Image (cartoon, helix red, strand yellow):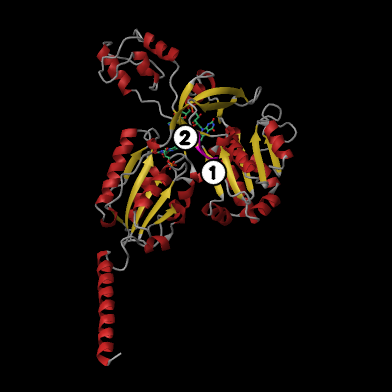
Amino acid sequence: MSSNERLLLVALVLLVYGLFCLWFARGYFRRGGLVAASDTLVAYASQTGTALALARQMLAVLPANTRLLPLNQVDDKVLSSARRALIIASTYGDGEAPDNGARFAQRCVTGKPLANLEFAVLAIGDSSYPRYCRFGRSLHQGLLERGAQPLSQPVELDASQQEATASALERWHSLFRTLDDAAKIEPLQSEAASLRQLWVMKQRTLLNPGSPGGPLFLVQFIPAEGQACDWQAGDIVDVTPTNDRSRCRQVLTQLGLNPKTQSIDPNRLMSFEDALVSRELPDVPPTLSRFDDETIDQWITQLPIIQSRKYSIASIATGGTLDLVIRQQRDENGRLGLASGWLTRQIEIDDSVSIQIHSNPLFRSPEPEVPLLLIGNGSGIAGLRAHLYRRREHGAKRNWLIFGERDPKADRLFADEINAWLESATLERLNLVFSRCPRRPMYVQDALYKNEDNVEAWVSSGAAIMVCGSRQGMAQDVDKALTDIVGRDVLDELEAAGRYLRDVY
Ligand SMILES: Cc1cc2nc3c(=O)[nH]c(=O)nc-3n(C[C@H](O)[C@H](O)[C@H](O)COP(=O)(O)OP(=O)(O)OC[C@H]3O[C@@H](n4cnc5c(N)ncnc54)[C@H](O)[C@@H]3O)c2cc1C
Ligand SMILES: Cc1cc2nc3c(=O)[nH]c(=O)nc-3n(C[C@H](O)[C@H](O)[C@H](O)COP(=O)(O)O)c2cc1C
């Protein structure tokens, strides 16, 4: 190569390098300096998967290096390395944080100033709860107090109202349209898009005759039209009950009205009785100034629409039936709970009901080789039973069930199945405990303390822990017992690693 040719080559290399630097610098400054525009963090706090589903949808349309984390895994290091935090946070319990946001809630209020952080909160809640969206609101406030820059007021999403959900998602979405790197975000889909199907009730069995506790029923459904039925162990259903028609008629006749009178509202071509079926009935008859059709229509319209209730699925899809375990509830006047009464009393064999399967990726059992401690009480057997069926299907043997009810004679739920699991070694260990056992009254947390060496050994050997049932009482006391046995730090690590999971209500 001549010296001229060599010079030309060097010039060409320098030119290419220069162009590359220019291109890189342009991108660098466009992205706002040291932090790339895609240094966005999407964080979620979710108990039953709604906030997680939305967070995943957002992740799918944001730049590839956007991080997705449960809120508990967001610490000061993560916050200070992000330019923008988009937080989707549901409220659970009594205005509290979901499990995977509770630790963040404790530490969010203190720490270094976050002046370089932009943030926005999508607060998910249900306006029928007194502490509506309280957790999302408190996150917004906490980040404000630490000097972070809000992109907007918290966007509040009322999950109980379809229209309100859609408009909140639109507001959240339009927030992104104003952000440079997220202009192409597709509208987010609300949960309403998930599967709602008709199911036929085929069997209803009382599980605890003679129990001192409320009656527990196994209610079994098959698909109405042979449609594919698919769900995973840990999923839950949403069912929307209706009022007993005789009660609607009673309310209307008490008001001196004919239940069959047609509503005059052109949007509701139905009788007063039909209109009342899906509305919450008042405990005492209303005092109406007039009893003309218009006043009655107005009164019916302002009654809240009955909200859906959640139930843990107690079976797996390959079993052929969708099973629920329902505790029949009664209020202090002996009146049946709306949904539990509807499922355990009102609907009849061969009736079709609309059920929405709600995917709950936050309550999935681990891989078959991972040992599993399943802890629960009462109707919590539902979720545990589904997981045990799944574990059996996958040949997982290291399963330990610790389950509590009241009476050792009346409350041996699913005794045949549990014996079969023991015989087939699906269950390696079993502790059934009864709080009203005359000889040895015991709660599940007592069983944990009594077996603390084994609990420690299982956790040390990599076991996961799943808890299902009452949030107050059982789940709280189990959490305390586990904290005492393995230590809070270990329990937090298990939670962070997806090895301490709860379906508690
Ligand atoms: C994730 C999850 C899983 C569950 N799994 C089971 C299960 O497997 N088995 C089981 O028996 N129960 C389960 N429950 C409880 C169930 O959803 C109902 O709360 C229970 O059956 C009582 O409902 P009810 O309509 O019979 O009583 P209600 O007539 O509703 O009366 C009970 C009280 O709860 C309030 N309430 C209940 N649900 C709602 C709601 N959605 N919105 C507003 N207020 C409400 C009512 O205002 C009332 O004060 C679960 C709950 C959750 C959150
Ligand atoms: C047991 C339970 C308690 C709840 N408590 C509240 C509450 O105190 N305030 C509120 O605004 N919403 C409350 N909600 C409504 C939830 O925030 C709403 O259902 C949300 O969609 C759940 O989202 P997730 O699936 O991400 O957990 C509660 C829901 C349940 C099932």
Q: Which x, y percent locates residue 434? A: 68, 34
Task: Give whichever of 208, 57 is nearer the camera.
Answer: 57
| Label 2 near ligand 1 (CB < 8 Å) | no
- Residue 334 in sight in this render: no
Cα distance, mark 2 to mark 1? 18 Å
Helix, strand, or loop for circle 2? Answer: strand
Q: Which x, y percent locates residue 10? A: 28, 85
Main SS of the magenta part reads: loop
Name the residue: 50% across, 45% down: 362
Residue 6 sits above or below residue 181 on the image: below
Residue type for callout 2: Ile
- Residue 437 in sight in this render: yes
Q: Which x, y percent locates residue 229? A: 50, 33
User: Left or right of 103: which side holds 23?
Assistant: left
Q: Earlier in the sequence, mark 2 or mark 1?
A: 2
Helix, strand, or loop for circle 1? Answer: strand
User: Left or right of 429: which side holds 268?
Assistant: left
> How would you rate the neighbour count of disc 1 (Cα within 10 Å): few for under 14, some for 14-19, many for 20 or more?
many
Q: Which residue is mark 1?
A: 502
Name the residue: 29% across, 38% down: 167
User: Left or right of 40: which side holds 407?
Assistant: right
> How would you rate the neighbour count of disc 2 (Cα within 10 Å): few for under 14, some for 14-19, many for 20 or more?
many
Residue type for callout 1: Arg
Task: Give whichever of 500, 59 is nearer the camera.
Answer: 59
Residue 456 sits above or below residue 289 on the image: below
Label ID, residue 357: 2
2 vs 1, front mark: 2
Label ID, residue 298: none
Quadrant housing the N terminus: bottom left
Magenta-highlighted residues: 229-235
Residue 390, picture quadrant: top right
